[in-house]
Image (cartoon, helix red, strand yellow):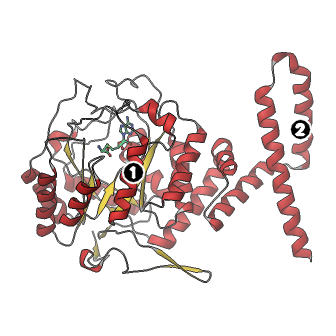
Amino acid sequence: MGRTFSSFAIAFTERLCYYINKYYRTEFARVRPEQEGERIEHCIFVYYLSILMPSHKDFFMKRLIDKLAATQTLEKEELLYLLSDYDDNSSEYLFARARDVAKQHFGDQIYLRGLIELSNYCKCDCLYCGIRRSNKNAERYRLTPEEVLDCCEIGHKLGFRTFVLQGGEDRHFSDDIIVSMVESIKSAYPDSAITLSLGEKSKASYQRYFNAGADRYLLRHETADPIHYARLHPKSQSLQNRMKCLYDLKSIGYQVGTGFMVGSPYQTLENLVSDLLFIQEFQPHMVGVGPFLPHHDTPFGHHVKGSMELTLLMIAILRLMIPNLLIPSTTALGTIHCTGREQGILAGANVIMPNLSPTNVRKKYLLYDNKISTGQEAAEGVIDLRNRMQTLGYRIPVSRGDYRPVHQHGNTRHLSPSLYPPIERSTSHVQSSI
Ligand code: SAH
């Protein structure tokens, strides 16, 4: 009886705080100068409220975060509230919960992916991207299949067991070339996973790459709101087709990654909530989130960059929404702040993607200004990252780092070790530590 009453009282107080907060936030936003008197009344009201419930905001935020952790979901309004009213206290609490969940699923391991930037030729004209077709100042390059294999060889010796082939939508790379590249990497390194990130293709093409041995595909949806999408892309590119690609990839059997930028021009918090809700519905295996960073030779060159804090918040929310999600601490995070990638890990990310591209082309794959592309050779880069992760209490295993589904058994959730990916495609998950 006592317990029922106290949980009722908590739920009631929560709802009350929520509506009061919502009420005074929207009412204040609407107040015009001639309503100054009303504004003062509001202030007195809120002042008394704050005496009655001194830490209602803290309390309410923590309850929301706990609810997200327990149920893996929140209402749209609740997500909006979390994104608009977070402060240091609530984000620290959120990060700690997200870190705990990541630890439950991945222990102290941070998975490594070797990023090979194939080509910066692109037929697309995304308004935010430095390698867009219209950027006549971009110094174009493409790697040969032999150069790609050389990168894999270096990477494999360093303990990489996933190679990510990313590039602009370069017509030169026909399906035949991509298929033969995937086949030769697979035959040279059968213990490694191949991730492709080559943009929008037909389902038949995706199927061919998969049959050749590609395991995963990254294709960020960029923004789940069609109106916002249209402001970031030319008319020839549609959200509808991007979404179709994502569903095609999933139906073929890829481990699929999607994602979005935080703080891209014209983005609202409602847009970010739509991104989260789309991800919750789509249930991808991987999600990449990074702050928008301007590139001086694009139409968005004068726009302000995205917020690191909000990006970290999105990572942590995603970790609580889909506990076993593979979440990289992105290059853009490392670019916006020198410890950005570490902070991403501490907010619940569990993947890092160092650059394996030849050093002479790294500066040319410039999606945004100041992209970190240290002149470091791959080997130095890995040693540096391993040290950075060790300082945080994590280690980097020699492993493909595949997605592993979570099975529900009564109340206990645990990871299934071998059901996914298909046996013939996977090797031992963890061999040793580098
Ligand atoms: N052609 C591939 C790879 C694109 S580049 C594809 O279409 O998927 C990888 C990602 O970099 C993009 O999906 C985008 O989210 C991100 N990106 C591009 N320009 C950016 C910018 N100015 N700031 C931050 N991220 C950017």
Residue type highlighted by circle 1: Lys
Which residue is label 2 attached to?
47
Where residue 390 sits, quadrant-wise, is bottom left
Q: Earlier in the sequence, mark 1 or mark 2?
A: 2
Q: CA distance from mark 1 to mark 2?
A: 51 Å
| Three-letter residue code for mark 2 | Tyr
User: Which of the two residues, 193 or 399, is positioned nearer the viewer here?
Assistant: 193
Where residue 78 sits: x, y (%)? 69, 51
> Is 317 displayed left or right of 127 in the figure?
right
| Residue 429 against residue 62 in the figure, above or below | below
15 w.r.t. 322: above or below: above
Task: Identify the residue at horizontal 52%, vertical 52% (top origin).
Answer: 278
Which residue: 19% across, 48% down?
357
Can you tell which of label 1 and label 2 is closer to the viewer?
A: 1
Give residue 44's quadrant in the image.
top right
Left/right placement of residue 246 relative to residue 10 reads: left
Q: Is residue 67 left or right of residue 38?
A: left
Which quadrant would the C terminus be assigned to in this image?
bottom left
Q: Residues within 10 Å of mark 2 (few under 14, many from 20)?
A: few
Residue 315, image x and y in percent? 51, 53
The residue most toward the bottom is 410
Which one is nearer the viewer's eye here, 360 or 218? 218
Tell me the tag on residue 244.
1
Assign a secondary structure to mark 2.
helix
- Disc 1 and disc 2 in contact, CB within 8 angstroms: no
In this view, 383 is above or below 419: above
Residue 171 - label: none
Percent position of residue 55, x then y: 80, 50
x 48%, y 61%: residue: 283
Tell me if residue 55 can be seen.
no
Task: State the SS at label 1.
Answer: helix
